[in-house]
Amino acid sequence: MIPTLFPDLIAIQATLAPERTALVDGGVRLSYRELWHQVTAVADSLLAASMKPDDRVAVYLEKRMETVAACFGTALAGGVFVPINPLLRDDQVSHVMSDSGARFMVTSASRLDALEATLAHSRDLSHVLSVDENVVLERDDLSIETWPAGQGAGPGSRRYRRIDADMAAILYTSGSTGRPKGVVLSHRNLVAGALSVNEYLKNTSDDRILAALPLSFDAGLSQLTTAFAAGATAVLINYLTARDLVALFAEERVTALTGVPPLWNQLVQQTWPAKAAENLRYFANTGGHLPRPTLDRLRSIFPQARPFLMYGLTEAFRSTYLDPSQVDRRPDSIGKAIPNAEILVVGRNGEVCGPGEEGELVHRGALVAMGYWNDRDRTAERFRAAPGRQKELPLEERAVWSGDTVRIDEEGYLYFVGRSDGMIKASGYRVSAAEIEEAVLAMANVEEAVAVGVPHPELGQAIVLIVTPAPGQALDQTAILAQCRAKLPMFMVPSRIVERPSLPLTSTGKIDRMLLARELSSPSQGRG
């Protein structure tokens, strides 16, 4: 049985191997049959609350059984799930709710209490599904319902007829400018991504895949989709320290983990008992370059595990991987295209680049997303005609133009060079410089603020904020950091603030961000 729609990933396993463990959430273990019952119960609950096809359902929870059931249940009912990173602050949550037009939200009582002021601005929200009982919210315009206790329907049940081209999810991701934008993914995108990644990772029903990344992150969601596509077990964790993961490795006999460089840098500092390390079959890196010392240490801790170095972007879920057999020969490469995708390197003249030439990475194939929700202009910038197609074809194929500069060698291996749009990649997250700047520019004593990313051995890039005081005003760096912590999630808070009386400009009169980044990357620069 081959999955077509997103919920099929669970439904098929509930038919083929109903008693196999699908999900581990702390002390709770759900079989595929039990998980499917949870999924169908959520779908029934949403439909009973008058959910219509393509209604958006915001899922604002930490990683837990209900989070998984809510995402798959929404898709089963014919809706579109919108996972919200639990690390986001009120302003970001408010933006996601408003921009997506979510009519439904799945959350907990504690999060709901904290969001009361934020939800007042969510004009479309009409129903809240709480995972806790006895929720009280002083809002006459909201219907509050508790987590469904029913067992739902059997495998294969589907409420509204959906096809693989329909929307399934919106994942919000930061870009180089403005607020986070919603990447719209179809059922086809999600299923094709799971099957493609499983083809090279070779996941099987024997695997126990640790889901350590946020489910609002495409690589985090992929831990669920690849596990369920293979009939494997997904192990959820909301870890506080890297030591928590070491303990879980031993307890759950983890065989697979995908992480980002900051996580790997933390894990290699831990003491690894043989029992904790012995079962790992592979580890995969995404979200930035993995430093060679960290890679070497990981291979020492897990000598039997195969290392996969990957590159991806939310707009195409996953794009390239480096085969483990090539890691020693070319550890700085991002590899070649994943199965069922083509990766092109395109120069400024629109021509495909040859070996040694630099150009923009362009991804074509089944994983290319449907565009940015509610944003035609940015969609037109990033999702454009695929280069090199037959001119006789009257309809253009859309590819995603990544904004990343890469080069290709004579054997077809790709190497990351840099971002063409100045976006910051810190702690595995895509960070909008404009969003950081907006939070700081709200302060009366700040005239100019520019956020740039500079190379960092553990974070990939560290965020440096360059600030110019308003005339006659003095800057208080402590107050600026407090403002950032209040308005932004911690991964967006600058690690360093530099005060300057003025900022350099380009020939067109714009702030020269690239010059600032180069200056701040220089070893001769002080802490500021």
Image (cartoon, rainbow, N blue to C red):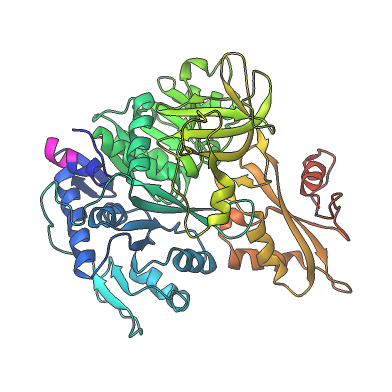
- The answer to which image quadrant residue 433 occupies is bottom right
What residue is rendered at 53% in x and 56% in y? 376
Please provide percent x and percent y for residue 133.
24, 72
Frontmost residue, 295 versus 310: 310
Please provide percent x and percent y for residue 159.
18, 56
Q: Is residue 420 left or right of residue 284?
A: right
The residue most toward the left is: 154
Frontmost residue, 125 versus 459: 125
The answer to whether one can see residue 278 in this image is no
The answer to whether one can see residue 509 in this image is yes
Up-down relation of residue 204 to residue 477 (above or below): above
What residue is rendered at 27% in x and 36% in y? 229
- The answer to which image quadrant residue 487 occupies is bottom right
Residue 14 sits inside the magenta stretch: yes
Up-down relation of residue 170 to residue 32 (above or below): below
Q: Main secondary structure of the magenta part?
A: helix
What residue is rendered at 38% in x and 36% in y? 193
Quarter of the N terminus within the rendering: top left
Please provide percent x and percent y for residue 370.
44, 47
Residue 323 sits inside the magenta stretch: no
| Magenta extent | 12-16
- The answer to which image quadrant residue 53 occupies is bottom left
Frontmost residue, 233 versus 449: 449
What residue is rendered at 61% in x and 14% in y? 410
Frontmost residue, 65 versus 10: 10
